Image (cartoon, rainbow, N blue to C red):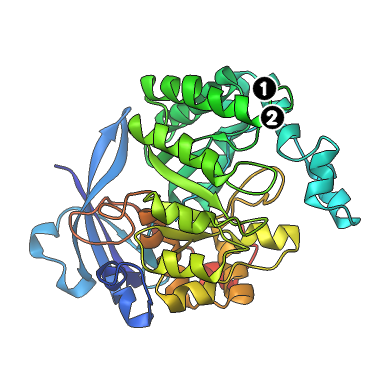
């Protein structure tokens, strides 16, 4: 087994206390901070490339066991921090087209709903994505994954949802599968979001039939998705439709996720809890009952503060969720219309300033808690022996450097 070591990290944050508390009500003592930290990990060959595999040892540099004395080491010289690889647990990374003009329209006073009614919004991206070939979508997606990685992301969820037809949804999911082959150093989770909207050529009920009777069986047969998501909101899908779609997905072996209570309070956060969803995402309009339901559940509350920022909307009640005992994660929601950044650190900045999350809460929300939102909490999100060797050697000497210096690029 080939081993590598990293030594003299200015600070190494293991996150052991975050895991021990299941990501809830986190404080600074839970970060497992090690000054002058070191880590030993194994590597494996994937496609002829060396890729980090498993963590073998974590501690201070001065206590590095003698049996590791001769292995190849990366010396951070006390100038760079070492943290778990960041996890972006909600993105829409595969698409074609551009919606910059819609941003200008919104800045001039039009609402998201008005733009949608005039043929913009999700449907405009659907048209461009349907017209693009699989190879073109892959060409567009590759630099996006690289950009995400440059911000410390080592696990990335990608949703479909810009096809809204059998073949176009499958095309997007096949691109996500191809990205896994291109980036073996990144864990990419695939989510089927066929119920993102419904196409203009088909009514909502008929489209639900198509999702359940044709799309989901094809997705399952080709093993193209780990999870299934539904956009539950006014003008999109009802709780009843989501119940049907996600029950069918469960029969076919896919875990559930829910776009919940974003544009209005539909009770979809509580619905997500009731069906045992991995996560309920957005939550801008969540009710008190929804907060209580999430706090008492294993469903992770995924906040997307970059989206509220970009839409100039009120943020989700993150402090209320945390105080109630919910497990809270952060993600970019990268997409072409309502959040156009791949910088998870920039999203951390917004969460710190507009929601009031602390350093410890932001760390938990982008590591262990985000792993739980993808069903990966047992293997990812902390730096501990036996865990996946997903880590980020930061270009900063402390974790908060990545979001206090907002807007930085690698």
Instruction: Specify whether 350 is left or right of 328.
Output: right
**Which disc number belongs to residue 130?**
1
Relative to 227, does residue 170 appear above or below in the rendering? above
Q: Nearer the viewer, residue 48 or 119?
A: 119
Which residue has dot 2 on it? 126
Residue 311 in sight: yes
Question: Which residue is rendered at x = 26% and y = 52% of the image?
Answer: 379
In which quadrant will I find the N terminus? top left
Considering the numbered disc 2 on the image, is that residue within a helix, a strand or a loop?
helix
Contact between marks 1 and 2 (CB within 8 A): the answer is yes
**Residue 395: image location, x then y, percent:** 49, 63
**Residue 380: image location, x then y, percent:** 31, 54
**Residue 289: image location, x then y, percent:** 50, 68
The residue positioned farthest toward the right in the image shown: 108
Question: Which residue is rendered at x = 65% and y = 31% of the image?
Answer: 204
Relative to 61, does residue 161 appear above or below in the rendering? above
Relative to 257, does residue 7 appear above or below in the rendering? below
Calculate the distance from the C-alpha at mark 1 to the C-alpha at mark 2.
Answer: 6 Å
The residue positioned farthest toward the left in the image shown: 67
> How dense is the environment of label 2, judged by Cα within 10 Å: few (below 14), some, or many (20 and up)?
many
In which quadrant will I find the C terminus? bottom right
């Amino acid at each position: 087994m080939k081993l590598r070591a990293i030594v003299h990290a200015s600070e190494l944050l293991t996150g052991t206390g975050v895991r021990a508390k299941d990501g809830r009500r986190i404080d600074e003592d839970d970060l497992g901070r090690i000054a002058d930290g070191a880590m030993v990990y194994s590597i494996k060959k994937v496609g002829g490339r060396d890729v980090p595999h498993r963590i073998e040892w974590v501690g201070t540099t001065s206590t590095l066991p003698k049996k590791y004395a001769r292995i190849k080491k990366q010396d951070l010289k006390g100038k760079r921090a070492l943290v778990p690889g960041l996890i972006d647990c909600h993105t829409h990374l595969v698409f074609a087209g551009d919606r910059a003009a819609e941003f200008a329209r919104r800045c001039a006073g039009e609402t998201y709903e008005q733009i949608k009614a005039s043929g913009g919004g999700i449907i405009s991206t659907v048209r461009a994505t349907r017209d693009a070939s699989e190879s073109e979508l892959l060409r567009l997606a590759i630099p996006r994954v690289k950009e995400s990685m440059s911000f410390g992301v080592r696990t990335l969820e990608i949703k479909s949802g810009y096809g809204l037809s059998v073949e176009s949804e499958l095309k997007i999911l096949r691109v996500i599968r191809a990205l896994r082959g291109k980036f073996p150093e990144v864990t990419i989770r695939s989510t089927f979001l066929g119920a993102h909207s419904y196409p203009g050529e088909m009514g909502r009920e008929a489209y639900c039939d198509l999702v359940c009777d044709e799309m989901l069986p094809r997705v399952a047969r080709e093993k193209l998705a780990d999870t299934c998501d539904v956009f539950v909101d006014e003008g999109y899908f009802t709780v009843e439709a989501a119940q049907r779609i996600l029950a069918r997905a469960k029969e076919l072996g896919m875990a559930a996720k829910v776009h919940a209570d974003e544009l209005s309070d539909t009770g979809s956060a509580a619905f997500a809890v009731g069906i045992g969803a991995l996560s309920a995402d957005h939550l801008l309009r969540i009710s008190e009952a929804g907060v209580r339901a999430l706090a008492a559940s294993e469903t992770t509350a995924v906040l997307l503060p970059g989206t509220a920022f970009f839409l100039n909307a009120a943020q989700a009640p993150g402090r209320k969720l945390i105080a109630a005992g919910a497990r809270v994660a952060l993600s970019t929601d990268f997409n072409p219309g309502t959040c156009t950044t791949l910088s998870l650190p920039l999203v951390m900045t917004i969460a710190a300033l507009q929601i009031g999350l602390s350093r410890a809460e932001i760390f938990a929300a982008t590591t262990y808690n985000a792993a739980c939102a993808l069903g990966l909490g047992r293997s990812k999100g902390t730096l501990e022996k036996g865990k996946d060797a997903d880590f980020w050697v930061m270009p900063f000497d402390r974790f908060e450097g990545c979001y206090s210096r907002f807007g930085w690029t690698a």
